[in-house]
Image: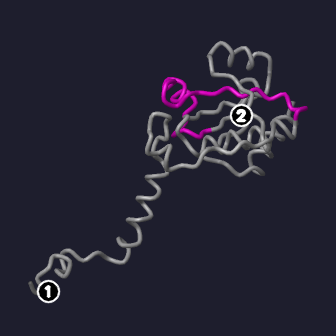
Amino acid sequence: MNLASTPAAHPKYRLSWRTRLLVPITVALLAACVDNSPGDERAAAASPAPEATTETPALVNEPFTEARFQALQAAGALVLVDVSASWCPTCREQKRVLARFQQQHPEVALTILNVDYDDQKQWVRHFKAPRQSTLALYRGDEQLWFAVAEVREDVIFEALRQGAAGA
């Protein structure tokens, strides 16, 4: 067989340098987004066990309910609506940042209400969340801040501090 007659040598089958570069990156990104649920043995074997750490405590928050949200609004409380999904790595990072904020600023009366992106679609639409990892800060009926996929600690901390200072 002649080398020129192989499919890889044919111009139709040659991959551009962009494709050769982007395909492995895309595959790696997609693999990072795969649901690592406990029932997935391949994912469990491939990912390292979570390390025990005292860096940030578990985030103390509540599941979203309309009644609770309305009661907090009526009281003029500072409320962060966290639209998140259990499978979302950005959401997990946001929760770590929020836990650090609560640990470093225990004086801030902040209630975090979690909207489940997968199970509470009515509220996802209500808060106009374009995707999971959406944060919306309220005091009463006023929306003070809105962010999507924001994980920078300084940005989140500043928004929460400004919301608390507005009391």
SS type, badge 2: strand
Q: Amino acid at mark 2?
A: Leu
How many numbered badges does the structure rendering display? Answer: 2
The amino acid pointed to by label 1 is Ala
Q: Is residue 63 magenta?
A: no
Which quadrant of the figure has residue 66?
top right
* Quadrant in which the N terminus appears: bottom left
Dot in front, 2 or 1: 1
Horizontal side, residue 164 vs residue 99: left or right: right
In depth, the one of 148 and 19 nearer the eye is 19
Taking the magenta stretch, the answer to whether it contains residue 112 is yes
Q: Which residues are magenta?
A: 106-134
Question: In the picture shown, does residue 122 fall above or below 96?
Answer: above
Q: Is residue 66 left or right of residue 55?
A: left
Q: Quadrant of residue 25?
A: bottom left
Residue bearing mark 2: 137
Number of the label disc, if any, that sits on residue 4: 1
Secondary element type, mark 1: helix
Mark 2 and mark 1 residues within 8 Å of each other at the beta carbon? no
